[in-house]
Amino acid sequence: MSKRTPILSMTLGASALMLVSVLGAWAQLQTSGQQACLNAVNRDGAAVAREQGKESLACVKGAGKGTLPGTAQTCLTADAKGKVAKRKAKTTAAAAKSCSAAPSFGFTGATTVNTAAQQAAVDLIADVYGPSLDAAIITCATSKTGCACQQKVLASLEKLAVVKLATFVRCKKAALRAGASAATALAACVDNAGTPGSIAADTKGKVAKGVISLNSTIGKACTGVANAFPGNCNALTQPALGVCLDTQVECRVCQAINEMDGLAVGCDVFDDGTANGSCASGTGPTPTSTPTSPGPTATPTSAPGTIAKGALPITYGRFNYNLMIGLPGANAACNSNYAGTHACTYSDLQNAEAAGDLDGLTDTDGSPVLGFWAIDPGAPALQQCTDNAIGGSNLNWEYGTSHTGSRGSRVSLDNGTGVLGPLATGVQCNTPGTLAWVGCCQ
C-alpha cells in the first residue's frame, strides 16, 4: 500500500504552530514546472494502462481464434510488438524532461508509475477471467457466441477503465491549477463525490455512459452464455454481472492511482461503497470477497423469513419497478413478487436482522443480496434520493441523475451471517459504486 508523505517533518513550538501551518500550506503549492511534471507523468501512466489493456484484449481475441503462438496467460505480459515498452519509455522521458524540480506530493517516479499502471491492467484480467486465462477462454470454434461475449465485454471494460483514469487525470490537473496543496486534494479526485470532475462525481457523465455501455454489451452479446467470466464474477447474471465487473474496474483503477501518485484512497470502500475487504488499497492481491456464485434461486411467492421475504434487483437509487417511478413502484413490485409485502424501511431491515431473515437472502434474479437502500419515509426528501429537479415531486427514491444535491442512505449486508453493517448516510444517488438492493418486507 502506498503511504502518504507527511507535509511537515519538524517539531514546532506551540507559539509558532499557527504561523508555520499557514506557511506550510502555501509551501506545498506546486510551481508551474512541478504541475507540468505531475500532469505529464500521470498522462503517460494512464497511456501505459491503456496500452496494456489493448494488449490484454488482443490476447483474449487471439486465444479465442486459436492464433496465439503461445499461451494466453504468457501473452498478457509478452508485449510481442513492444508497444507497452514504448509507452513506458515515454513516461520515463516525460519525467526526465519535466521533473527536474520534483513535486512535493503526488509524485512517485516514472518506474513506479509504469509498474503500477501495467500491473493493475494485468490484474484486471485475473479478476475477470480467473487465475488461468487459458482455462477461461471460450474458443470461437467451440461457441461463436461465447467467444464474442468474452471479447466484446472485455473491450467495453477496458474502455471503462480508460475513462475512469482519464477522468482522474483531468481532475488532478484542475486541482493543481486551482492551488492543491496536499495529496488529499488529489485523492478527492477519486472518491469524493463533492469534488467536481472526480471519478465519483462523474460531472460529465462519461463514467455513467461507460457503465451503461458495458451493461448494454453484456445484454446484447452474452445472452445464453454461461460462465464467460469465471473470475470474481463467476456464475453471475445480469444485472449483478455488470455491477460486479464494474467493481473490478473500480478497484484496479483506484489501486493504480494510489500507487502512481502515492495516495491513500480507500479503494475497498470506493469500489463498491462498502468496507468489506473486496479491494486492497494498493496494487496487489486480487479481490476475494466479491460474490462468486449467485446462490440458491429465490422462490418469490414463498416466505424465507418472518419479516423479509426477498428483494428486488439492485438499483442506483432511482426506483423504476413495475413501470412506475419511485416508492409506489417498488411497493408494487414487492407485492407482485412476494405477496403482501412492501419495500423494506430501515426499521423493517433491523427487525428482519433480529428475526434471522437476512441470512442467505437472494433477489428475484437469484443473486445474493449484499446491501440495501435504507428507506426512511419520515426523512427529508433530499435525504431519500428524491429528484428535486422536476418540480418537487414527493416520490421518494426517484432520483435519475446526479445533478442535484439529493442523497440517500444505504446499509451493507453480510449475506453469509445475515448481519447488517453500519448505516451510511449522505450517499450520492445514481453514481458509480452506489448500487443497492430493495428489500421486500411483510
Image (spheres, rainbow, N blue to C red):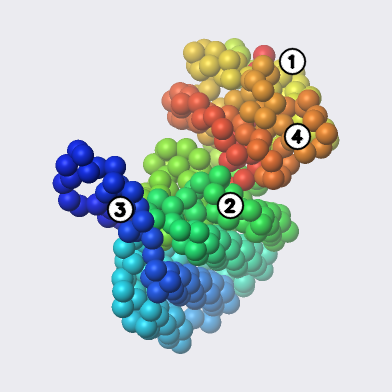
Q: Secondary structure at mark 3?
A: helix
Residue 358, horizontal then vertical, whole percent:
53, 23
Dot 2 lies on which element? loop
Q: Is residue 373 left or right of residue 253?
A: right
> Mark 3 or 1 closer to N-term?
3
Q: Nearer the viewer, residue 48 or 82?
A: 48
Residue matched to label 3: 24
Q: CA distance from mark 3 to mark 1?
A: 62 Å
Name the residue located 47 percent from the left edge and 50 percent from the top edge. Answer: 188
Closer mark to the observer between disc 2 and disc 3: 3
Check if mark 3's residue and mark 1's residue have beta carbons within 8 Å. no
- Horizontal side, residue 431 vs residue 173: left or right: right
Q: Which-is-in-front pick, marks 4 and 3?
A: 3
* N-term-proximal mark, 1 vs 2: 2
Q: Which mark lies nearer to you, 1 or 4? A: 4
Instruction: State whether residue 343 is above or below residue 73.
Output: above
